[in-house]
Image: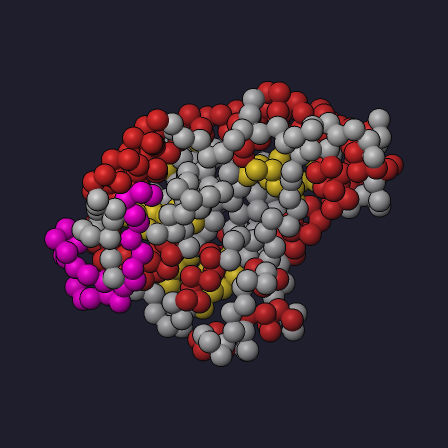
Amino acid sequence: MKLAINGGTPVASAPPRVDWPEYDDGDRKRLIEVLESRSWGGFPAPAPRTAEFGAAFAARHGAKFGVGVTNGSVTLEVALGALDIQAGDEVIAPCYTWVATAACAVHMNAVPVLVDVDPATYCIDCDQVEAAITERTRAIIPVHLGANMADMDRLMAIADKRGIPVIEDCAHAHGAAWRGRGAGSIGSIGSFSFQSSKLMTAGEGGAVITSDGTLAQRLQSIVNCGRKEPGYDGFDGWPLGVNARMTEFQAAVLIGQLERLDEATRRRAEGAAALARGLAEVGGLAPLSVDERVTTRAAYQLVMRYDPSAFGGAHRDAFLRALNAEGIEAYGPFYVPLPDHKLFNAESRHWPMLRERYGDGIKAANARGELQFPVAARAAYDEAVWLHYPYLMAGQGAIDTIVEAVAKIRANAHELAV
């Protein structure tokens, strides 16, 4: 059977996935209640729905306190501010992630120190974290990536030994757990995004969680322009805050999203397991291994490793073009090493604390060949295949269709451009 990319009939006439995001009458009712209440957020802070959601979301992940935030990039800056990160402080982060994970340090006039990722999981490489620590290191930001989690046992051992706080970037990890502990509750602060592609979404939005009462107060104060109000006025000093308050409309939607999280997490995990079994029979494309210490798996993306030898030596991108033509949307450079990303244009003329480490800036240092991340580069440009989670929620028929498409391409690998 000829491949669709060469004029054959596609395996799927339309992508076999569920409509996302999902909503129900409860969401509609809460939104109308907020509308009619005329209390839409801003004041008081936190507003009632936002406070309700923050507490429930934190509890779901095993933390004591939760603060609603306007989006999941500002959450990281708020977290650094609550930890009193200062100009010139170093913040260690993985290079294979979304821009915000490291840009948050730049925006605080701190210095991101990028390290490579583990080839087995694409999460932060703990050996490189340990090697990167200096007397200036003030925070570590691991990312729970795709359907994996960073090695929190090792990271916390490294950080606790040196008194360095850990901020978990959980933008992919709503509902995940490591040894039974919720994502975001293991380090000092957990940061979550509710942007439109995420496992829970209100279009935009974010949350920070913690079990440290003083940090919780500082987080809420910073989100509310630096104000100190009853309930979050029990700490010293006045932080320079930002207006990063969540609206009541966002909170109303997210309450419903949280109510459905466990069921959605189960569906995604079952879909990921079924797809792994199906792909194992075909060969050539295999999901990354998941650490057995991940006791609840949150599959934001199913990240797979491509083996060109199973497809006649064809490059991953040729395989992806063929897969997309068969009706299965998948991505290769979903992430690239951060210094390669056009949005990570951090220049020392704007952020002078970068100069000592990076000269004119991070891209300038990258152009000089000073920043080398071979594992992330291999993943981004040759190896990784990212499949978005709505496919995993669409039932066994959708899984079978994906497997059929991969099998068709392998059987006709001679049609791919090598």
Q: Quadrant of the N terminus?
A: top right
Residue depicted at 52% across the width and 61% down the height: 114
Coloring basis for residues: secondary structure
Q: Which of these two is toward me, 133 or 102?
A: 102
Indicate the quadrant where residue 319 lies. top right
Q: Position of residue 410 (x, y in %)?
A: 79, 32
Q: Is residue 224 above or below residue 178?
A: below
Residue 239 within the segment the image draws in magenta: yes
Identified at 17% across, 54% down, the residue is: 232
Residue at horizontal 79 percent and vertical 38 percent from the top = 5
Q: Quadrant of residue 416?
A: top right
First to last magenta residue range: 226-250
> In the rendered image, which quarter contains the C terminus?
top right
Left or right: 69 in relation to 352:
left
Rendered view: 370 above or below 10: below
Residue 145 position, x and y percent, is 51, 44
The magenta stretch spans residue 379: no
Of residues 179 and 1, the one drawn nearer to the viewer in this rendering: 1
Specify whether 134 is left or right of 405. left
Q: Position of residue 166 (x, y in %)?
A: 38, 53
- Is residue 353 in view from this perspective? yes
